[in-house]
């Protein structure tokens, strides 16, 4: 994606971005009449059409738009205190041209470095001495046998056993919730499952749900839910289901 070929449709200009920069440098288009926000919107729309982020194009565009904004701000807002001198049109054009040229040189240097990296990546330098260099005689400093023996004993000692008890998951038995729900159904014919497991841990809630499925399988209860993720309502069945099952199964604690 080339930023300079970006098509613009502004009030003061219509055409490619490169032509606008040329006309601004030649002072044929007043910079104060250029809608910089429209340029930014056109660039963002171009990026959205491509559906991919071009970092090189974004960097080049930011440099160009930042230069235009600074020059336009200097031309719109004068220095009332006299601390900064107002740029003349010739100086503004020279400043913009200098910055664009500096950006072009830096970009070419980056491309040159990338080419060098691609060409030299399969070459490796030697860390050791040159082949014809005289061999270096390595001498060990005086060693204490007692310290060496202590180091060997430390290596031979068995490391302490790491305890994994804090990683063990403890699951309550399913029968605990079976008895709890059956006792609750003796007192009343209907209850909300979410209200009964409120305040329990996630593991306890999962085991309680297994108990609920076991009661539903045996025909002791019926489960109703208005919509997905809505509260689960449990009702007592007056007539149990048939105990004949093709593949009976038993709910066990995890």
Image (cartoon, helix red, strand yellow):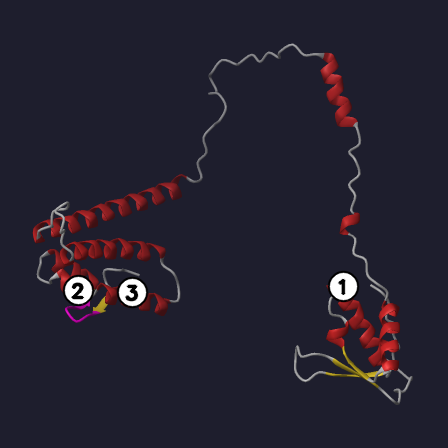
Tell me whether circle 2 and circle 1 mark residues in contact (CB < 8 Å): no
What x and y, as percent, mark residue 164? 78, 47
Q: Residues within 10 Å of mark 2 (few under 14, many from 20)?
A: some
The magenta-colored residue range is 9-15
What x and y, as percent, mark residue 51? 39, 67
What x and y, as percent, mark residue 174? 85, 68
Residue at 82 percent across and 61 percent down: it is 171
Residue at 72 percent across and 16 percent down: it is 147
Task: Judge left or right: residue 146 versus residue 23.
Answer: right
Q: Does any portion of residue 246 appear in the rendered image? A: no
In front: mark 3 or mark 1? 1
Mark 1 element type? helix
* Residue assigned mark 3: 43
211 shown above or below 164: below
* Residue assigned mark 2: 34
Residue at 76 percent across and 68 percent down: it is 205
Task: Judge left or right: residue 59 versus residue 92.
Answer: right
Of residues 88 and 120, the one drawn nearer to the viewer in this rendering:
88
Q: Does any portion of residue 5 appear in the rendered image? A: yes
């Amino acid at each position: 994606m080339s930023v300079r070929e970006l098509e613009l449709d502004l009030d003061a200009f219509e055409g490619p971005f490169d032509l606008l920069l040329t006309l601004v440098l030649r002072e044929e288009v007043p910079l104060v009449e250029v809608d910089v926000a429209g340029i930014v919107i056109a660039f963002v729309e171009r990026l959205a059409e491509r559906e991919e982020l071009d970092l090189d194009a974004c960097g080049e565009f930011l440099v160009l738009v930042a230069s235009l904004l600074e020059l336009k701000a200097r031309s719109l807002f004068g220095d009332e205190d006299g601390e900064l001198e107002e740029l003349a049109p010739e100086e503004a054009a020279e400043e913009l041209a200098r910055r664009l040229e500096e950006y072009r040189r830096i970009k070419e240097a980056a491309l040159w470095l990338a080419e060098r990296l691609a060409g030299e990546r399969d070459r490796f330098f030697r860390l050791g001495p040159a082949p014809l260099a005289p061999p270096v005689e390595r001498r060990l400093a005086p060693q204490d046998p007692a310290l060496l023996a202590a180091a060997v004993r430390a290596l031979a000692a068995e490391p302490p056993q790491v305890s994994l008890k804090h990683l063990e998951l403890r699951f309550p038995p399913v029968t605990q919730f079976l008895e709890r729900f059956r006792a609750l159904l003796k007192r009343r014919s209907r209850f909300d499952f979410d209200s009964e497991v409120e305040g329990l841990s996630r593991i306890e809630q999962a085991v309680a749900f297994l108990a609920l499925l076991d009661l539903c399988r045996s025909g002791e209860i019926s489960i109703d839910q208005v919509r997905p993720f809505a509260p689960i309502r449990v009702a007592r069945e007056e007539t149990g289901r048939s105990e004949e099952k093709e593949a009976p199964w038993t709910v066990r604690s995890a």
